[in-house]
Image (cartoon, rainbow, N blue to C red):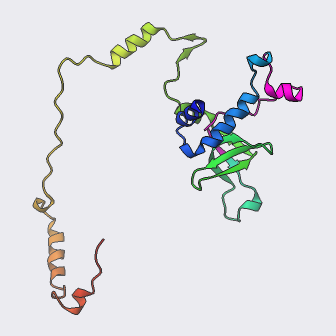
Amino acid sequence: MDVVCAMLHDQRLLKFLWAEAANTLVYVQNQCPHQALGSKTPEEMFTGKKPDVSHFRIFGSPLYFHVPKEKRNKLGASGKKGIFVSYSENTKGYRIYVAGRREVEISHDVTFDEDMALSKVDNLPTLRGSKEVDTRELKEKEDETMPDVEEPMDPIDPPSQEPSSSRKRPSWLRGALDDAEGHIAPRGTFHESKKPNRY
């Protein structure tokens, strides 16, 4: 369950999608080599052939999927935005979480935006070619961006705002309000008591 929590947290998804994350985890693990099986996959041991993993996608990546004509009217959108949450067990397709309707749909006509999924991930290691960035360079960058503060800083007070009653109204507004006060029904009359309450 730790991996499932990490998957949900990594892509900032809601906790109620934990079952979809667990389903994805099991599906991917069954198609990855295991040391206990002599570097073969469980799928390969069961069926005798290597599984195709070209359809693997990043969990939680945003995507756009096609809505068939049967499921929409003439003015309905032909595509919707969703989030990839799992692989379909019965058909060749993807399970897609549609956030606006809080439901999971299955579709195989999908366009993924995996660059957006990678941009959600924080603290990815920065690589230059195949070598990691020198730690001295990171230290120098950190020194440049974070100046040393020797004394505690005083908090900045927000600018004082004048009360709204002391502000002067424009002359045209004052004249209009004075004219309107002459047309108000006296207190306690029928018209005064029927005024709706303001919310």
Please check the rendered image and state whether residue 63 is part of the magenta-colored stretch, yes or no: yes
Residue at (16, 44) in percent of width and height: 159
Given residues 97 and 19, the one toward you in this image is 19
Q: Quadrant of residue 71?
A: bottom right
Given residues 21 and 93, the one toward you in this image is 21
Horizontal and vertical percent position of residue 11: 55, 36
Residue at (19, 17) in percent of width and height: 150
Please check the rendered image and state whether residue 68 is part of the magenta-colored stretch, yes or no: no
Horizontal and vertical percent position of residue 179: 16, 80
Q: Is residue 162 above or below residue 62?
A: below
Bounds of the magenta segment? 39-64
Q: Quadrant of residue 72?
A: bottom right
Identify the image quadrant of the N terminus.
top right
Residue at (19, 88) in percent of width and height: 185
The extreme left residue here reads 166
Identify the image quadrant of the C terminus.
bottom left
Given residues 168 and 62, the one toward you in this image is 62
Q: Main secondary structure of the magenta part?
A: loop
Q: Is residue 102 above or below residue 37?
A: below
Q: Quadrant of residue 18?
A: top right
Horizontal and vertical percent position of residue 29: 71, 28
Q: Is residue 171 left or right of residue 69?
A: left
Q: Is residue 139 above or below residue 46?
A: above
Residue at (60, 13) in percent of width and height: 129
Horizontal and vertical percent position of residue 171: 14, 68
Q: Is residue 178 left or right of residue 133?
A: left
Q: Is residue 119 above or below residue 90?
A: above
* Residue 80 seen in this snapshot: yes
Given residues 25 and 188, the one toward you in this image is 25
Q: Is residue 46 left or right of residue 107?
A: right
* Residue 50 seen in this snapshot: no
